[in-house]
Image: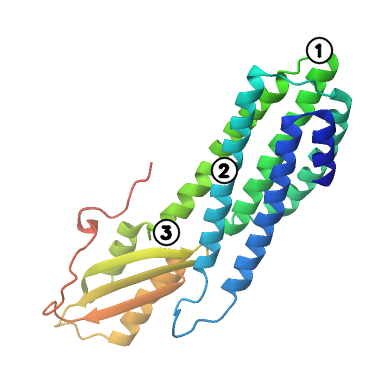
Amino acid sequence: MVAEVIGGILSGSLALLADAGHMVTDAASIGLAIFAMRMAERPASIERTFGHHRTEILAAMINALSLWLIAGLVMSEAYERFFDVPEIEGNLLLIVGALGLAVNIAAAWVLHASTGHSVNVEGAFQHVMADLYGSVGVVVSGILIRTLGWNIADPILSVVLSLLIFYNSLGLVRKVFHVLMEGTPHHLDVYKLCHDIESLEGVTVIHDVHAWSISADEELLTAHVLIDPDWTGDVQELLEEVRRIAYEDHKLTHVTIQLETSTRNCKERHHVGHLEAKSRVRA
C-alpha cells in the first residue's frame, strides 16, 4: 500500500492511487471480518439470545458498501482526468503495479478457500479481488503508457475497474440483504420440507412455518405440527423424527417444533402454499 501511494504520487497515476486505496480497505475489511468472527464466538446472553452471530452479516454489508464508495470516488476522479490528462511515468507505474498484483494474488489465494462458508469472509475476499482487478488494470495501463504513450488509458481503466468492482459486489449485497430481510435459506426447499413432515404417520398438517438465517451457518426453523387426535403412536418418537428431517435431511441448525392436536386458539395458520406442491422448482 505504501509503495503504491508513493508510486502513484510520483508517477501521477490515478489507477495506482485507486489500487492503494483498495489496499487500505482490504486491511480494514479483513480486520472487520476477524472482529465479526470473534464477536460471533461470544456466548448468548439474556439480552441477545441468539448471541452475536448477526455481526458477521453487518460486517459483510459494511464491506460491500465501502466497495461502492471507493468505486464512486475513483469514477469521479477519472471523469475529471478525461478533460485534463496528466503525464504519467509508465515504467514506475508498471513496476509498482506488478508488485501489487503479486501481493493480491497471494491474498486472494489465502482467502478463497473460506468464501463458501461465510459471507463475512466473502466480503473480505471481494475487497481483495477488487484490489487484484485494480492491480491488473495498473499493469495493463503501465504497458499501454510505456509502449504507446496512451496516458488516457489510466482514467479509462480506472472507470472499467470501478464498474467491475460494483458488479462483483452485487452478489454479496444480495446475500446480505436476503439474510437481513430474514429470507428463507437458499438451499432450503420449504415445500419439500413440509411434504416430508406431513408424510409421517400421525401428522395431519404443518403450519406457521418460518425459516430464516441469522448468519451464514445459523439457519432456523419454527413450525406448528398438527397431529391426528385419534393417532395412537408415540408422540416423542414423532417429534424426534420431525427434528431429524429438519436437521439431517434439510441441513437446518436450530429447530423449534410445536406439536398440536387442535388448531383451537392457534392464530398462526398460514401454510406457505406447500399444500399445492411437493417441491419448489428453482430457476
Q: Which residue is mark 2?
A: 69
- Residue in view at x 75 percent, y 42 percent: 20
Of the pair 282 and 123, the residue shown nearer to us: 123
Image: 85 above or below 2: above
Residue 229 percent across, percent down from the top left: 15, 82
Local crowd at mark 1 within 10 Å, few (<14), some, or many (≥20)?
few
Which three-letter amino acid code belongs to the residue tagged 1?
Leu
Marked residue nearer the N-terminal end (1 or 2) = 2
Q: Is residue 227 visible?
A: yes
Query: Tag 1's secondary structure?
Result: helix
Q: Which mark is residue 148?
A: 1
Residue 221 percent across, percent down from the top left: 37, 69
Q: Nearer the viewer, mark 1 or mark 2?
A: 2
Q: Are marks 2 and 3 in contact (CB under 8 Å)?
A: no
Of the pair 235 and 39, the residue shown nearer to us: 39
Of the pair 119 and 81, the residue shown nearer to us: 81
Task: Specify the quadrant that holds the C terminus.
Answer: top left
- Residue in view at x 17 percent, y 81 percent: 261
Which three-letter amino acid code belongs to the residue tagged 3?
Leu
Numbered disc total: 3
Q: In this image, 262 relative to 51: left or right?
A: left
Q: Which residue is mark 3?
A: 180
Local crowd at mark 3 within 10 Å, few (<14), some, or many (≥20)?
some
Image: 176 above or below 255: above
Q: CA distance from mark 3 to mark 1?
A: 49 Å
Residue 231 percent across, percent down from the top left: 18, 82
Marked residue nearer the N-terminal end (2 or 3) = 2
Q: Nearer the viewer, mark 2 or mark 3?
A: 2
Q: Nearer the viewer, mark 3 or mark 1?
A: 1
